[in-house]
Amino acid sequence: MIVDSVLTNAKAYINGQIIDCSIAIEEGKIQKIGKETQMPQADEKTDLHNLLVLPGLIDEHVHLRDEGKAYKEDFSSGTAAAAAGGFTTVLDMPNNDPVTMSIGTLRNRMETAHRKILVNVGFYSEFPKKLTEIPDIVEGDAVGFKIFMGCQIGGLYLDDDQALQDAFKEVAKLNRPVAVHAEDRAMLTANEQKLNQAKKTGTADFLRAHTEAVELKSIQRLLKVSEQTNVRLHFCHVSTEEGLNAIAEAKKSGRKVTCEVTPNHLLLSIDDLKRYGQMVIMAPPLRDRNHVDALWKGLADGSVDTLGSDHAPHAQTEKSASSVWDVKVGVPGLETTLPLLMTKIKKNQLTIVQTVQLLAEKPAEIFGLDDRGRLEQGKNADLTIIDFNSQFKIDVSKFKSKAKFSPYDGWDVQGKVVKAIVNGRIVFDEGEIVATGGSGFIVRRGSG
Ligand code: DOR
Ligand code: ZN
Ligand code: ZN
């Protein structure tokens, strides 16, 4: 048999170990992993010169925008940024224009995406107004539902516990996860109104609105509302010690809950908010050091399941305003996450095993991406190839994302993404995108 390609001299992450091996790829799947002498003949051979090969990384938390928000990011630029950052699969959030919250909006989004995408993309949906539409959305291959608890974005009325419970029951029957942005809308808007009336418009005032209590209240409410529903709740970007503890407790009692942290909440704190100002306004906001330490502890003890970049691109002009309330929240993250983490590995603050769990194995498990997350015969040939020792400075002007700003601009990091292989094809190679739109596939149920 002559396969499509063989990669030789790889140092590949297989079941928790780095193994010297070669990898054969046929029709977008891993056909064989073994010694070079055991490899089948191939149309193409690539010598990886002992570079580190990880299972194609998955970023479960990305805002790709496009459609009405294409000026901030579109499917081409967003998935180019993903490939350059070492992510071969990303999951797209639904707060778009129009909001992804029906079979129609989901299908339109997939239609717009499929010829443009360079990496695999799965789509979340917000909840529809009518619960009877939930099965259609699942049939339409949404990877899961996302609910923003901080403001009304989808069709589900946030203040109604019963409506939330009914929706959770419906999704549980169909065995899809529900990702949540946990900030309590009522508490948050009351805080914002008070501050607005007092003409408080500085960056510190943003923290006075998005308090720790705002996050905790929402987490506690959701844990209670979901108690009898069997739903799988996945808490996005947990930013507080108390919030993480509440989730860890629920897990210990056997509840099916999981949670994510972002690099921003691990690497930055309130000090950086003072330093970088409005650029690092995000929701939830950067916190005090004690919370940062608690998140690191959560990584070490397994209370944290996944890492998501929360890639939130905006036009640069939207990142500064005379009032903090007019600043768009979020920063791009696809092209900084992996080198930032690799740098932490170098400093012995994180292990490669943790990183692969957080960015590949766990997201694959939570979102049912059965063909991904591990290097194994038969799995999708999605591979992230890294020069672990290569040192460089993060440079926003080189971003493939339209959002060319970052608090990490100029940071010294190590661990350069050399190639990203998506569905067996090299998409990103030595700084360049070398494939055409459509090389990535839409993630569908059953297709992994
Ligand atoms: O910082 C954020 N940015 N938090 C959100 O909840 C939304 C996101 C965005 O879409 O920009
Ligand atoms: Zn969010
Ligand atoms: Zn987000």
Image: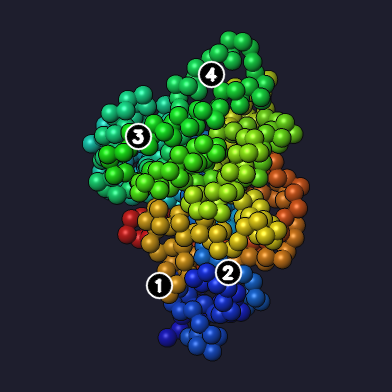
Q: Which residue is mark 2?
A: 53
What residue does disc 4 label? 191
Q: Residues within 10 Å of mark 2 (few under 14, many from 20)?
A: many
Q: Which mark is residue 378?
A: 1
Q: Is residue 293 visible?
A: yes
Q: Residue at x 37, y 37 (%)?
A: 223
Q: Is residue 39 above or below residue 4?
A: below
Q: Between disc 1 and disc 3, whose residue precedes?
A: 3
The kind of residue tagged 2 is Val
Q: Are marks 2 and 3 in contact (CB under 8 Å)?
A: no
Say which element carries label 1. Answer: loop
Q: Which callout, 2 or 1, points at the residue further toward the start of the chain? A: 2
Kindly state the secondary structure of the residue where label 4 is placed.
helix
User: What residue sits 25% from the left and 43% below the top?
Assistant: 135
* Mark 3, residue position: 224
**2 vs 3, front mark:** 3
Give the residue type at disc 4. Answer: Asn
Q: How is the image coloured?
A: rainbow
